[in-house]
Image: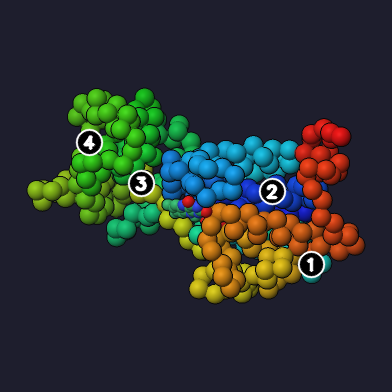
Amino acid sequence: MPTKTEVVILGAGPCGLFQVFELGLLGIRTHVVDSLPEVGGQCAKLYPDKPIYDIPAIPVCSATELIDRLQEQLKPFAPVMHLGETVTALEPLADGRFDLHTSNDTRFDAGAVVLATGLGAFQPRKLRIRGAEAFEGGAIRYHVSDVNEFADKRILILGGGDSALDWTLELMNIARSITLLHRRADYRAQPASVSTMKSLVDGVKLREYHATVRGIFRNDNGSFAGIEAFDPDGTTLHLEADIVLVFFGLSPNLGPVAEWGLGIEKKHIVVDTENFQTNIPGIFAIGDISTYPGKKKLILSGFHEAALAAFGVQSHLYPERKVRLQYTTTSKTMHERLGVATTK
Ligand code: FAD
């Protein structure tokens, strides 16, 4: 049975999170879906430690701190979060509502939808070698869902970022052996993880190689045997493994959004700036995914868009309700929704 809800927000980047807050102020409940396992969108994935200087009234904060503050601010409205799920299908229903499906088989029956999908759904960068696709989900994996699957296995980890190093250290106590393969000698991961990893390299339980992946090699029966790589001297390495974990980072992909009949201009969704509604009544788009004359891809623009989209959603869901602008400073109703006391 689909979950019936007033609004589904696609994307838990800064704009999707602020959309929860703005809808909450109007008394509208939300479910939020994001492909990533954590909230924060580009802020969390692309520049978590970088300082941001152009958020109104916050002279400087890191991208992580901004996301923490947004999460703190939306707490009173307790959205239902569905992380690690991509919305794969969105269809208007005959009664004006929307049927949404996710990659985890979650279904929603929503009165309105807000697309805050930014650059698109972040997907793992794939291992681009012949034959890799056939082993995806088996011998070749892009994420760890159950660590027990790695017990007593020979694991080959590809990559040099935080995920590669974190999983190398995490799986050390579970796997039979781990081979870490990175194309360069310098790592992008936290220096502390790199030095811990180096201190554990013993050539048996943990091996470290710097080489470029070239292909797959198989057993006589065609099953997966391991990865072939070339080191900088041109020597061919045959790295045997039961499971290969690939951590080449994430890349955004507009993906299914392009197939939902929305007005699209240069990979962005065209909106009406009065309420940030798309060409389909009941579907709104804010943040980096939206486009209109003069659009600037800034977080503060997305916040403004979220405020106006909230009123648009309210008018769509409850056309009989009078649109009233209330101040959070003085509105008793908003204080109740925020769970704060009204002062005289
Ligand atoms: P995003 O942050 O891109 O989040 C979108 C989310 O939607 C993602 O988490 C994605 O996984 C999810 N998603 C997409 N499709 C689906 C789907 N089908 N199902 C489920 N989930 C989906 N802006 C500023 O204002 N000031 C700055 O100083 C600044 N510095 C920046 C520095 C860098 C290095 C970068 C890359 C950007 C910077 N920006 C800055 C831009 C700012 O980060 C973006 O404008 C902002 O992140 C847009 O937010 P968003 O919520 O629209 O989208």
Left/right of residue 210 with respect to residue 75 in the rendered view:
left
**Label 3 C-beta lies within 8 Å of the nearest ligand 1 atom:** no
Which kind of residue does numbered mark 1 sit on? Answer: Gly
Q: Mark 2 points at which residue?
A: 20
- First in sequence, mark 3 or 1: give its number: 1
Q: Mark 4 points at which residue?
A: 208
Left/right of residue 273 with respect to residue 68 in the rendered view:
right
Looking at the picture, how far across and down is residue 275, in whole percent? 72, 65
Q: Answer whether labels 3 and 1 touch (C-beta < 8 Å).
A: no
Q: Which mark is drawn over residue 246?
A: 3
Q: Which mark is drawn over residue 241?
A: none
Q: Residues under labels 4 and 2: Cα distance? A: 45 Å
- First in sequence, mark 3 or 4: give its number: 4
Q: Mark 1 points at which residue?
A: 96
Is 199 or 12 nearer to us in this picture?
12
Left/right of residue 41 with respect to residue 322 in the rendered view:
left
Which kind of residue does numbered mark 4 sit on? Answer: Glu
